[in-house]
Image: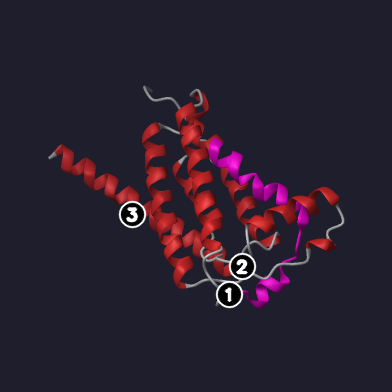
Amino acid sequence: MNSLSSIDRRPDLRQMLSAAFGMAAGLAVFILLERGVTPRYVFATALDERIPFIAWSWFVYVGFFPFVIALAAYARPPAFVAFRDAVLIAFVAGVVCFLLFPEAVPRPDVAEIGNAFVRHRLARMWRLDLAANGFPSLHVAVTCLACRMLTERRRGVPIAIGVLICASTLTLKQHTVVDVLGGVALAMGSAIWVERRSVRGRLAWRK
């Protein structure tokens, strides 16, 4: 009983700032990268056409940022370091995919959104985040990594929120189903690689 659960610990300011800075830096690189490539692929399927556009899911989508920062704040330091490494691997792999498979993501007309607040927020976001480079979804990848690596006990609520965030990428038409599946696969691969490397490191240290 020497270790405290995440719910009993005080927030780690350094981890919060590290997570916030990392996401801001990654977003800046992503936005610049979008303007340097020409989309050549469309991964949208008939299933994507069946998924309704829900403008209000913008609130869930942007909730990704405080969600990850909050989980990072209360994570154990070793777990946060592993999460950071996995996110870096996922980001590099994602950038490679963006360059190899530049995707055009079909988006609806924001003028059709009735609520002025949501319409303006979404229009501003889409002016920055172009309809390109959706595969794989880093939004989904980082969300999955946070749920897997930054939570210990009482994981039900974080996982439920994570599922909603991932779903919002579809209902907001930020990503296609293929993008989301790619993000999940990317998260799994990055997490497994980091976790196995950590196990090998501990075994080598004991020897």
Residue highlighted by disc 3: 193
Count residues near mark 3 (Cα–Cα under 10 Å), then give few for <14, some for 14-19, many for 20+. some
Residue highlighted by disc 1: 43
Count residues near mark 1 (Cα–Cα under 10 Å), then give few for <14, some for 14-19, many for 20+. some
Q: Where residue 80 sits: x, y (%)?
A: 42, 38
Q: Where residue 151 sits: x, y (%)?
A: 48, 39
Q: Where residue 199 sits: x, y (%)?
A: 26, 45
Residue 193, image quadrant: bottom left
Q: Is residue 15 left or right of residue 60?
A: left
> Which residue is most to the left?
207
- Which kind of residue does numbered mark 2 sit on? Thr
Name above or below for residue 184 compared with residue 144.
Answer: below
- Residue 201 is tagged as none
Choose between 41 and 63: the one closer to the eye: 41
Q: Is residue 190 left or right of residue 38?
A: left
Q: Secondary structure at mark 3?
A: helix
- Which kind of residue does numbered mark 3 sit on? Trp
Name the front one of labels 1 and 3: 1
Q: Is residue 95 in the magenta section?
A: no
> Which residue shows up at 23% across the image and 41% down it?
202
- Which kind of residue does numbered mark 1 sit on? Phe
Q: Which residues are magenta?
A: 44-69
Q: Earlier in the sequence, mark 1 or mark 3?
A: 1
Name above or below for residue 11 compared with residue 175.
Answer: above
Residue highlighted by disc 2: 176
- The span from disc 1 to disc 3 (Cα, nearest Å) is 27 Å
Count residues near mark 2 (Cα–Cα under 10 Å), then give few for <14, some for 14-19, many for 20+. many
Please report contact status of discs 1 and 2: CB closer than 8 Å, yes or no. Answer: yes
Name above or below for residue 59 compared with residue 16.
Answer: below
Q: Secondary structure at mark 1?
A: loop
Point out the image quarter for the C terminus.
Answer: top left
Choose between 166 and 25: the one closer to the eye: 25
